[in-house]
Amino acid sequence: MDDERNIPVEDKDSPFADDTLTAEQQSYSDEQRAAREKAVSKHTIAEEVLDWLRTICIGVIAGVLIVVFVLQRDNVYGPSMMPTLNSGDVVFTQKISTYFSAYNRGDIVILNGQGMEGYTKTEYLVKRVIGLPGETVKIEDGNVYIKPADGTEFYILEESYLPEGTKTTMMDYGLAKGYNEVTLGPDEYFCLGDNRPVSNDSRNLGPFSKDRIVAVAFVRIFPLSDFKIL
């Protein structure tokens, strides 16, 4: 009997195959793994940068749209709205009302007075809505009188926002123009400053058309100690 035995060679796919790699193979495998991890890392960083850029762009666009179409910050200059607003105050104003012409008596509005006879400045005006479209506004005996659009009688306008004893009088220029008694058109508003002795308003400039109202003030944000909903 031939005592030489055939020793089978293990199949490389056998579960009992030796999975040991040579040093060269191990080095190559490590390089592949490192390359993959580096590629994944670069891809992840690029995605994060793009995400940040998208977020920043969306934020900038949203901010611009809000400022242009919804909200803005305005600074108050001059004493015409004292004591409600002082020179140097900062207010937030909203533009939503301008899209619907939704103004109420007592609203503090930002007005574009450029081109109106008697107004030579370029700055916007800050005034309070007193008379609404269709109403008749009369200033007499230191009071403001309102006759509703569908009414026949005047009533004295109660203005709780004014200091007690405030008198509303006419200036000679406005009196000559007949602004002491005005019936407002369908798109006109009679606006006055709270500081009646010094305010240049509808008593001199006449009624403001609705397209001259650019925003409505709703909160004073500065100085912080005087924060107030208007």
Image (spheres, rainbow, N blue to C red):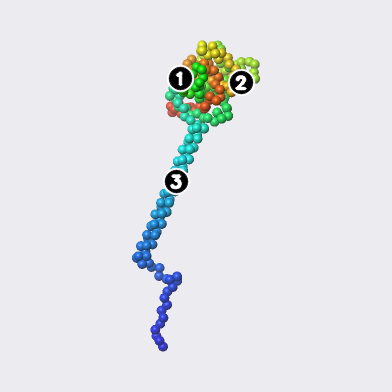
Q: Residue at x 50, y 32 (%)?
A: 68
Q: Which mark is residue 50?
A: 3
- Asked which secondary structure carries label 2, the reply is loop
| Secondary structure beneath label 3 | helix
Query: Which class describes the residues within 10 Å of circle 2: few (<14), some (14-19), or many (20+)?
Result: some
Residue drawn where x is 45% and y is 71% of the image = 14
First of labels 2, 3 by sequence position: 3
Q: Which residue is mark 1?
A: 79
Residue 88 vs residue 109: left or right?
A: left
Residue under the point 49% across and 22% down: 114
Total labels: the figure holds 3
Residue that label 2 marks: 134
| Callouts 1 and 2 close, C-beta under 8 Å | no
x, y percentage for residue 112? 50, 24
Residue located 51% across and 11% down the image: 172
Q: Left of 217 or right of it: where is 34? A: left
**First-in-chain label (3 vs 1):** 3
Q: Position of residue 130 (x, y in %)?
A: 55, 20
Nearest to viewer (mark 1 / mark 2):
2
Nearer-N-terminus badge (1/2): 1
Q: CA distance from mark 3 to mark 1?
A: 50 Å
Q: Amino acid at mark 1?
A: Pro
Q: Is residue 191 visible?
A: yes
Q: Quadrant of residue 78?
A: top left
Furthest residue toward front = 115
